[in-house]
Each structure stands twice: as C-alpha cells, then as structure tokens.
C-alpha cells in the first residue's frame, strides 16, 4: 500500500501528514553533518634520520675522434678490442671496426719497421657512403 500526496491531503488527518513527512525525511537520509570529537593529545615527532645522499650520476665523457690520431695499434686495441679486419696496403696498416651503424677505418703509417702511428681516420656506412666521423666513433666507444 503506497502513500500518495493526494491521499494524505484528502484524508485530512494530521497524523497521516506527520507520518508521511516522517517517511519522506527518513528516505532523504541524514541532513546534518556528523559532529567530530576533539581529542586533546600530544603528538610526538619521530626523530629525524639522516637522509642518504643519492650517488652523483656518472657522466660519460667521450673524447673527440681525432684523439685517435698518433695512437699505436696497441693503443687502439686496448680501447676498442679486437678489430673486425686487419689489412695492409703497401706500407700502411689498417684496422677496421664495424657496428650496425658504421665502419671505422684507422690507417697507420709505418714510420719504421716497428713504429706505427694512426695518421688517417675514415667513417662510412655499410653501403660505403661517408659518415660523420665523431658519430661513428661514439657508436664504437666503450
């Protein structure tokens, strides 16, 4: 059995109107905000611990490719490891290093029987087209 507004007004009984208003108020939920209790208590601060310092980021410094000039084959081997190819052309000794991006040729002039120093550098892609020497060097640099 439902209560309609019209049936309450038509009924003319105050009790019915009060019951309907009570029912409507109950359906609407609580209209007042709950009262918060205030608690007086002392808050103790925890002792502050030393915050560990973060390690400084390692900055990788890559030298210029031209620093290879004047180096011996042993110096280059120490820096880059085993070359992909070693060849000789006349009195020149050539070490070749290769990545997916480039091919670096380091040419050594043979000044004496045992004394060789890098005197030319060249960089190219897999198709043989000239590349930026520094970018190629950086792709090989450990």
Image (cartoon, grey):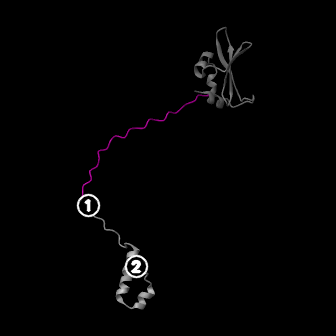
Relative depth, front residue between 139 and 19 = 19
Residue 56, magenta (yes or no): yes
Task: Count how many numbered circles sit on residues in the image.
Answer: 2
* Relative vertical location of residue 123 with respect to residue 116 in this rendering, above or below: below
Give the spatial CA distance, label 1 vs label 2: 36 Å
Residue 111: percent from the left, percent from the top? Answer: 67, 11
User: Residue 23 lies in magenta, yes or no?
Assistant: no
Give the label, 1 or 2, closer to the camera: 2
Q: Is residue 78 visible?
A: yes
- Report whether residue 94 is seen: no
Horizontal side of residue 91 vs 4, given as left or right: right
Q: Residue at x 38, y 38 (%)?
A: 52
Mark with earlier residue (1, 2) = 2
Quadrant of image for the C terminus: top right
Residue 39: mark: 1
Q: Is residue 25 above or below residue 48?
A: below
Report x, y in % for residue 115.
64, 11
Query: Which region of the structure is painted magenta?
Result: 40-64
On-image quarter of the N terminus: bottom left
Left or right, 55 with respect to 97, comes to left
Asked if disc 1 and disc 2 are in contact, CB closer than 8 Å, the reply is no
Tell me which residue sits at (60%, 27%) in the image.
141
Q: Position of residue 134 (x, y in %)?
A: 65, 30
Residue labelled with disc 2: 24
């Amino acid at each position: 059995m439902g209560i309609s507004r019209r049936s309450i007004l038509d009924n003319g009984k105050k009790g019915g109107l009060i019951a309907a208003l009570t029912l409507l108020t109950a359906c609407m939920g609580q209209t007042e905000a709950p009262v918060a209790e205030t608690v007086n208590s002392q808050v103790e601060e925890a002792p502050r611990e030393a915050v560990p310092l973060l390690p400084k980021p390692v900055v990788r410094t890559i030298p210029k490719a031209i620093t290879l000039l004047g180096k011996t084959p042993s110096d280059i081997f120490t820096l880059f490891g085993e070359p992909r190819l070693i060849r000789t052309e006349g009195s020149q000794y050539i070490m070749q290093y290769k990545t997916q991006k480039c091919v670096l040729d380091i040419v050594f002039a043979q000044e004496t029987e045992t004394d060789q120093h890098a005197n030319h550098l060249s960089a190219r892609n897999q198709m043989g087209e000239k590349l930026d020497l520094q970018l190629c060097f950086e792709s090989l640099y450990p």
